[in-house]
Image (cartoon, rainbow, N blue to C red):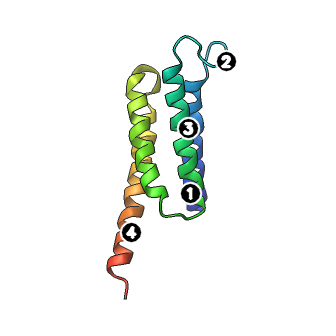
């Protein structure tokens, strides 16, 4: 059950990054400056990859999750007034990722 909740959290957080890709006023991609728009889309793709790899139980999801959180936080800081609450979700994701990384390391160390 918790596995699916984390999957949903990762996917939902990624989907929220699509708001930065789509202009909230017109519902169309931002035309004036495409660079921030594309960066928000990249952040969505990173979280999508993280959620899928996590659901499939692939070990690489930990590293992609860390990259996703760092990239996401960079984008959040760039528009702090509008996206500051994403920091809370990034912190939650980072805590869970660190927990899984430590659990994985402990399993390798204490393996018979």
Q: Tag on residue 103?
A: 4
Disc on the earlier residue, 1 or 2: 2
Q: Residue tagged by mark 2?
A: 28
Task: Name the residue located 53 percent from the left edge and 27 percent from the top edge.
Answer: 38
Q: Secondary structure at mark 1?
A: helix
> x, y percentage for residue 107?
38, 76
Q: Secondary structure at mark 2?
A: loop
User: Which residue is at 35% across, 70% downward?
Assistant: 105
Label 3 SS: helix
Say if mark 3 contacts mark 4, CB within 8 Å: no
Q: Image quadrant of residue 71?
A: top left
- Answer with mark 3 or mark 4, whichever residue precedes in sequence: 3
Distance between the Cα atoms at labels 3 and 2?
17 Å
Q: Secondary structure at mark 4?
A: helix
Q: Disc 3 vs disc 2: Cβ atoms closer than 8 Å?
A: no
Q: Would you name the residue on which mark 3 appears?
A: 44
Residue at mark 1: 53
User: Quick one: label 3 or label 2, which is nearer the N terminus?
Assistant: 2
Q: Closer to the observer: label 4 or label 2? A: 2
């Amino acid at each position: 059950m918790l596995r699916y909740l984390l999957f949903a959290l990762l996917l939902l957080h990624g989907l929220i990054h699509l708001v930065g890709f789509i202009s909230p006023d017109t519902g169309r991609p931002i035309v004036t400056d495409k660079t921030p728009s594309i960066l928000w889309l990249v952040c969505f793709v990173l979280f999508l990859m993280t959620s899928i790899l996590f659901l499939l139980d692939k070990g690489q999801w930990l590293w992609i999750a860390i990259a996703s959180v760092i990239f996401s936080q960079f984008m959040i800081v760039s528009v702090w007034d509008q996206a500051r609450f994403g920091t809370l979700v990034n912190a939650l994701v980072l805590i869970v990722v660190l927990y899984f990384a430590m659990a994985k390391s402990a399993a390798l160390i204490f393996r018979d």
